[in-house]
Structures are given as structure tokens and as C-alpha cells.
Image (spheres, rainbow, N blue to C red):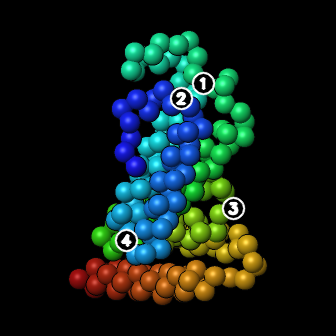
Amino acid sequence: MAASNIDYIRPVTEKLSTAKALKAEGNEFYKKGETKKALSRYHKALLYLRGIKCDIYDKERFNFGINTSKGDADKVSAAVEKDVLDTEGQVYNNLAAALLALPESDPEKIVSYAESAIERFPKNEKAWHRKGVALFKLKKFDEAEEALKASLSFSATGIPDPKTKDMLARISEATVQHKQKQKDMYKKMLSA
């Protein structure tokens, strides 16, 4: 979808429809294993959503020659505003998932996206899981364990996710190894 250079004057609901369509395209690419194309669509959707938030919340807009005393907050219903924020949370969660699928991805970025999703959906099992996996990659084992335990506590089915349980086991193993390395290092230092 090519963005028009006059998208700033389109109604918020039209821009939201475009963002949702981009998110849906991203989901289809992700399902096909075309992760980089999915990421591209998610990023474009996020740009639309950020633009919508500017439309809603900016008090003074001098960009594009528009000078108003208020944003469009008065013109947007609470339901549309909620839909914008919910869609944004979903896109952040999808970005975290897609980046986890790429081995070369920056775990800090995954944590950031997962946290943005959690901010909108504090009980989202998948967002907590993705945050935990990324923290594990960063070797922040205590934080990873905390995030993964949160993921388990928010299970919609009440049945623990096997992937989350596996990650918790890996964290336990990594923690034991880390502590042993520290012991060995201290032992070596004291014997010198």
C-alpha cells in the first residue's frame, strides 16, 4: 500500500483501516515464513498508528501548513481511540514475534516491543513469553525467569505453555552454569 503524500488529511478511521490492513498483510507474510516482509508491513502499520495518535493528541499542528488550536481528540470516539491503542499493542506484539524468528535480531529491541505490547495488554501471555526469551538471549536470567513466570500465570487455557516451561528449564540450567563459573573464578583468584 503506497502512502499518499496527503495522508495527514485523511480521516482517522481511514488511516486506522490502512494500519489494520498492513497488520493483516504482515500476519500473512509471517505465516508464510516471510519474516522480513512481515516486519516491513508491521513497521508501516506502526507508522500509520503513530500518525493517528498525532492526529488525536497534538494540540498544535504546524506540519503540512495546518495550524489548529486543538487536535482531533474531540472528533474521535472513545471506541475508535481504544481501537487505535489496541491495534498498536497488537502490532508491537507481532513485531516482537517476528524479530524472535530472526536469529540476527537485537534482543533489546524485542524486549522493547514486548514491553510496549505489555503496556497495552498487561496480561498478554505471548508478550510476556517473548520478553522472557529476549531477556534470556541477553543473559538476564532473573528478569527472563520473572517474565516467563508471568507468561505462565496469564495462560488463557490454564495449561502451561510447553515452550515457556522449556525456557524456564533452560534458565535454571544456565543459572547453575553461571554460578559454577563464578565459583571457579573466585577459587582461582583466591588460590593465586
Q: Amino acid at mark 4?
A: Glu
Q: Quick check: 192 left or right of 133? A: left
Q: For the residue carrying disc 1, how many other residues have a C-alpha within 10 Å: few (<14), some (14-19), or many (20+)?
A: some
Query: Which of the pair 22/108 is nearer the observer?
Result: 22
Q: Earlier in the sequence, mark 1 or mark 3?
A: 1
* Residue 52 image offset from top left, x and y in percent: 53, 36
Residue type, mark 2 in image: Asp
Badge number at residue 187: none
Task: State the residue at coordinates (67%, 39%).
Answer: 80
Count residues near mark 2 (Cα–Cα under 10 Å), then give few for <14, some for 14-19, many for 20+. many
Q: In the structure shown, which secondary structural element does the residue marked by tag 2 occupy? A: helix
Verify CB contact (< 8 Å) between mark 2 and mark 4. Answer: no
Q: Which residue is mark 3?
A: 123
| Disc 4: which residue | 34
Q: Are marks 2 and 1 in contact (CB under 8 Å)?
A: yes
Q: Nearer the viewer, residue 85 or 37?
A: 37
Whether pointer 4 and pointer 3 mark residues with C-beta atoms closer than 8 Å, the reply is no
Q: Nearer the viewer, mark 2 or mark 3?
A: 2
Distance from Cα at disc 4 to Cα at disc 3:
28 Å
Q: Which mark is residue 72?
A: 1
Check whether the beta carbons of the residues at disc 4 and disc 1 lie within 8 A of each other. no
Quadrant for residue 42, please give it.
Answer: bottom left
Give the residue at mark 2: 55
Establish if 126 lies above or below 95: below
Is residue 102 shown above or below 112? below
